[in-house]
Structure formats: structure tokens, C-alpha cells
Image (spheres, rainbow, N blue to C red):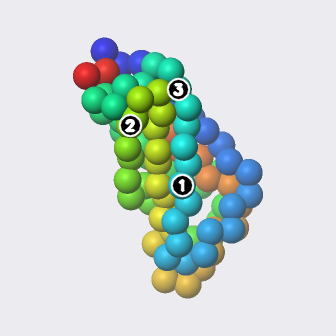
Amino acid sequence: AVTGVQTWLFRSLSTAAGATYTLTITNSAVAAADMVFASVAFGTATTGMPVVTRVTPGSNSITIIVQNIHASAALNGTIVISFLVAKA
């Protein structure tokens, strides 16, 4: 069963080129065996190139790692992360 899509909008990030940002979400509906799919998009940011590099479900939590893969530009604003949980 799918628990639905949730979206998180973040305050201004200034993640440097090549650097990562780690987000841990507490959610009692998530189990370690669940599958979690995540995507990232610009909110107010106009530079950088954010990509989801790892999604790790845990017992009551999800850890999502976003990396700015741009060669030289830092992120300069908010990003939006959306995720979907598929129950094991």
C-alpha cells in the first residue's frame, strides 16, 4: 500500500558545489523494510543542481541525502523534496 506523497519545502540553503545536505524525517508510518521514492526540485533556488543521491527508510524515519552536483555554483535558495512511501 502506498501512504501518499508528501512534499517538504526548505528554507534557504547555500549548499556548496559538490556538497551534500542530509534531511531526516520522522514519520511513524515508515518501517525499515518500506520502499521510499524521493525527488528534488527548485523552490526559490536558481543556481546549483540538486539531485537525490540516497534514500534510506528506517524504523519511524526516512533519511534523504541531496547533493549539489553543479561544478561551481552553490544552491542559493529553497528546494522542494517530495517523497512517496510504499509499504513492504
Q: Quadrant of the C terminus?
A: top left
SS type, badge 2: strand
x, y percentage for residue 26?
55, 32
Q: Residue at x 68, y 48 (%)?
A: 10
Kind of residue indicated by mark 1 = Thr
> Which label is found at residue 87?
none
As drawn, 1 above or below 22: above
Kind of residue indicated by mark 2 = Pro
In the figure, residue 4 lies in which quadrant? top left
As drawn, 81 above or below 69: above
Kind of residue indicated by mark 3 = Asn
Q: Residues within 10 Å of mark 1 (few under 14, many from 20)?
A: few
Residues at marks 3 and 2, CA–CA distance in whole angstroms? 10 Å
Tell me the residue that label 3 is attached to. Answer: 27
Q: Residue at x 48, y 33 (%)?
A: 61
Residues at marks 3 and 1, CA–CA distance in whole angstroms? 16 Å
Task: First in sequence, mark 3 or 1: give its number.
Answer: 1
How many badges with numbers are in the image? Answer: 3
Q: Residues within 10 Å of mark 2 (few under 14, many from 20)?
A: many
- Do the residues under discs 3 and 2 have CB atoms within 8 angstroms? no
x, y percentage for residue 52?
43, 55
> Which label is found at residue 22?
1
Q: Residue furthest top?
A: 1
> Which label is found at residue 57?
2
